[in-house]
């Protein structure tokens, strides 16, 4: 019998670990090719790992709830064949792997369980373990913390500059230096040194008011996704200086054009033509003219993104939110964008997105109008610097200028809101971008065929 090691797959850009949320197969179970073995979750997406081969699940190396680094072996499969057939079997397994995921690595010889390596040990002088911590800590950070006798509880108070607020090597070293010097600059320090010492001081911990429950109140813990959304939103507000600008848009031409072609489009393509692809295309066209909006901030560096990858905030049936990403939107036709939007939205609601499909966004669009909201002030999806909000389309009386004078007409009006990071996007730039989107939508070609 030959053995395969099933490893934690690569799960998209910048993802370094995943949580095993549920084992779908038990040790000793016979597994068919493409059967899902385990459910996993990251801060971006939930997914399943399927088996690319037929065989028996011989050993599960991690428990539910364990956090596993990418590339670690999580289970051993036993399949028909012998060692001489391993190379051929490996090629078959690689061909069957999920796109974007490196699922199978072949092995022969002894099984080396690693479940004990994954169990985190608490540091000294603390009752909080790494497993109970609210964020991930790298082995390097843990080793430094252990050497400096920093407890997990104390680590949790350190401001992290890494992804999702994670503590980097520089963060913990700065914290240690600040702690040793007590954060006080000497009298001989220069003004610059004094400023640096002050900047390194920890922000005072904000004390939340106590919340008392009353008779009849129901206390429901947040699920994992809602906790991640909450943490991400707080992190974004702390990271970016949020400013929001608004503009009215007359979309009467678009409404009339869509109403005239949507039935034929549905018959021909088997899909609905909604307003969302139209607005996403307009947003991408405007980003071509204002690339400063299609950017990220890294310290005091600005990263101007080459690709225009637009995230589409999508409400899930359970009330949570996910943001699938349309890649290279500026290179696609409206038909291509429409099919992409419909496909991603449907699979998002069915929890069938691949990890790569929620990664790599450079700008986000969120549609408040789906729920008849007039407008809103969205929170920037880090590490992006702007997000476009789409309000409901309403019929309104509007003053129109004509050669014969001003007249009042009934028009379809919507409000666009742009929340942007004032660190690099000023009001003038935000306003110009909104104005460009408005012009694209109001000058819509009503003769265009899709």
Image: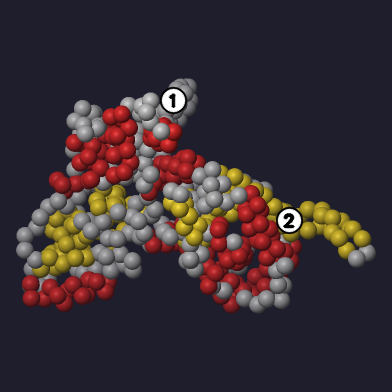
**Where residue 450 sits: x, y (%)?**
62, 76
Q: Is 316 drawn above or below residue 122 in the view shown?
A: below
Give the label on residue 4, or none.
none
Q: Which residue lies furthest to the front in this view?
A: 188
Apparent side of residue 47 relative to residue 325 in the rendered image (left or right): left
**Where residue 30 sits: x, y (%)?**
18, 62
User: 165 or 323: which is nearer to us?
Assistant: 165
Distance of mark 2 from mark 1, alpha carbons? 44 Å
**Label 1 packing within 10 angstroms: few (<14), some (14-19), many (20+):** few
**Where residue 256 sits: x, y (%)?**
73, 67
**Where residue 122 sits: x, y (%)?**
20, 35
**Comes first in the chain, label 2 or label 1:** 1
User: What's the residue at 24%, 68% (across, down)?
Assistant: 52
The residue labelled by disc 1 is 207
User: What's the residue at 19%, 65% (across, down)?
Assistant: 105
Q: Does the rendering let one see residue 448?
A: yes
User: 41 or 441: which is nearer to us?
Assistant: 441
Give the total number of marks visible in the rendering: 2
Examine the image and state in which quarter residue 443 appears. bottom right
Apparent side of residue 51 relative to residue 376 in the rendered image (left or right): left
Pick the quarter of the image with the N terminus.
Answer: bottom left
User: What's the residue at 48%, 55% (across, down)?
Assistant: 302
Q: Does the rendering let one see residue 417?
A: no
Give the label on residue 413, or none.
2
Apparent side of residue 288 relative to residue 439 in the rendered image (left or right): left
Q: Nearer the viewer, mark 2 or mark 1?
A: 1
Q: Is 213 drawn above or below residue 383 in the view shown?
A: above
User: What's the residue at 22%, 75% (across, down)?
Assistant: 92
User: 188 or 422: which is nearer to us?
Assistant: 188
Q: What element carries label 1?
A: loop
Q: Is 73 drawn above or below residue 126 in the view shown?
A: below
């Amino acid at each position: 019998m030959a053995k395969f090691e099933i490893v934690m797959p690569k799960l998209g850009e910048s993802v370094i670990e995943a949580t095993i949320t549920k084992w779908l197969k038990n040790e000793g179970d016979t597994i068919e090719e493409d059967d899902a073995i385990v459910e996993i979750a990251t801060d971006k997406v939930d997914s399943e790992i399927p088996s690319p081969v037929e065989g028996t699940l011989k050993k599960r190396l991690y428990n539910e709830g364990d956090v596993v680094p990418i590339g670690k072996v999580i289970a051993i499969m036993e399949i028909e064949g012998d060692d001489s057939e391993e190379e051929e079997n490996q090629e078959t397994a690689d061909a069957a792997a999920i796109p974007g995921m490196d699922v199978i690595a072949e092995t022969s010889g002894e099984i080396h369980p690693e479940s004990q390596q994954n169990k985190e040990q608490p540091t000294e002088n603390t009752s909080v373990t790494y497993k109970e911590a609210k964020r991930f800590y790298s082995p390097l950070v843990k080793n430094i913390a252990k050497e400096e006798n920093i407890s997990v509880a104390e680590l949790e108070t350190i401001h992290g500059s890494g992804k999702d607020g994670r503590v980097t090597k520089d963060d913990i070293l700065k914290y240690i230096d600040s702690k040793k010097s007590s954060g006080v600059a000497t009298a001989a320090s220069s003004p610059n040194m004094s400023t640096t010492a002050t900047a390194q001081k920890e922000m005072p911990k904000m004390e939340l008011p106590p919340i008392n429950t009353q008779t009849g109140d129901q206390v429901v813990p947040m699920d994992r996704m809602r906790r991640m959304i909450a943490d991400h939103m707080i992190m974004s507000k702390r990271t970016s200086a949020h400013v929001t600008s608004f503009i009215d848009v007359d979309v009467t031409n678009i409404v009339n054009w869509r109403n005239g072609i949507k039935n034929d489009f549905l018959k021909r393509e088997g899909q609905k033509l909604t307003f969302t692809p139209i607005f996403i295309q307009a947003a991408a066209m405007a980003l071509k003219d204002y690339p400063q909006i299609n950017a990220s901030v890294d310290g005091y560096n600005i990263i101007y993104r080459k690709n225009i990858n637009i995230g589409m905030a999508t409400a899930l049936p359970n009330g949570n939110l996910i943001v699938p990403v349309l890649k290279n939107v500026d290179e696609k036709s409206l038909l291509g964008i429409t099919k992409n939007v419909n496909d991603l939205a449907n699979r998002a609601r069915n929890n069938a997105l691949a990890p790569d499909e929620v990664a790599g966004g450079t700008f986000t669009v969120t549609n408040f109008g789906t729920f008849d909201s007039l407008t809103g002030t969205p929170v920037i999806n880090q590490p992006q610097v702007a997000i476009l909000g789409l309000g409901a389309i309403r019929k309104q009386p509007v003053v129109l200028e004509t050669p014969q004078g001003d007249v009042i007409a009934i028009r379809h009006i919507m409000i666009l809101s742009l929340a942007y990071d004032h660190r690099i996007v000023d009001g003038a730039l935000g306003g110009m971008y909104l104005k460009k989107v408005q012009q694209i939508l109001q000058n819509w070609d009503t003769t265009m065929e899709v």
